[in-house]
Amino acid sequence: MKTKSTKSVVYGGLIAALYVVLTFVANAVGLASGAIQVRLSECLTILPCLLSSAIPGLTVGCVLANLLTGCAAWDVVFGSLATLLGAIGTRLLRKKPFLAWIPPVISNMIIVPLVLMHVYHIPDVTVFGTTYAGFLPLMITVGIGEIISCGLLGLLLYPLAKRVIPAEDQD
């Protein structure tokens, strides 16, 4: 029994570390935060389909990534909450991985624009020279980034992770 528990902690820690590293990669090219973002680390939100330990791993990884990239305190709290809620939703849909990427997209589409507006005072987004004001445009731009990260990249990651993680460790 201790072996399973130890493995869960190790998997959670590895996922947290990967989340931080991938966030730093996205941050290096200016995509980890802001009105238009494609946080590469969010592709890992598909992992709760395979491992329950991915939920705390993703949450801790998000907290650390947000702290280490200089996010405001409220962003650390609510951004990490969005990742936690998304990971729980993914876990609930684990039998349907083709749909399991949707909860992190929805939680981030709702929470992140509010953080951008109220914490960073970003009232609008400019796309191709045109400025759009309000919650809905921010929701759309964050949503597109999340669809790329969670949907496209997450679904590409899923079969690889399913092969790499030993079947006896998947739960």
Image (cartoon, rainbow, N blue to C red):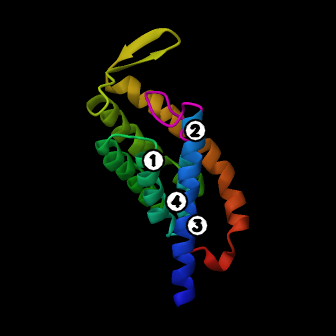
Q: Could you say which quadrant of the image residue 163 lies in?
A: bottom right
Where residue 78 sits: x, y (%)? 32, 46
Of marks 1 and 4, the one in the foreground: 1
The numbered dot on residue 50 is 3
- The residue drawn where x is 55% and y is 83% is 4
The numbered dot on residue 5 is none
Q: Callout 4: 10 Å neighbours few (<14), some, many (20+)?
A: many
Could you tell which of marks 2 and 4 lies nearer the N-terminus? 4
Residue picked out by circle 4: 16
Position of 154 with respect to 2 (left or right) is right
Residue farthest toward the top in the current orientation of the protein: 129
Magenta-drawn stretch contains 68: no
Where residue 46 sits: x, y (%)? 56, 55
Where residue 76 sits: x, y (%)? 35, 47
Marks 1 and 4, how far apart at CA? 13 Å
Residue farthest toward the left in the current orientation of the protein: 118
The numbered dot on residue 26 is 2
Residue picked out by circle 1: 68
Q: Secondary structure at mark 1?
A: helix
Could you tell which of marks 2 and 1 lies nearer the N-terminus? 2
Q: Is residue 96 at least partly visible in the picture?
A: no
* Viewer-nearest residue: 39 or 97: 39
Where residue 24 sits: x, y (%)? 56, 43
Magenta-drawn stretch contains 30: yes
Q: What is the total number of numbered labels drawn onto the structure image?
A: 4
Position of 168 with respect to 116 (left or right) is right
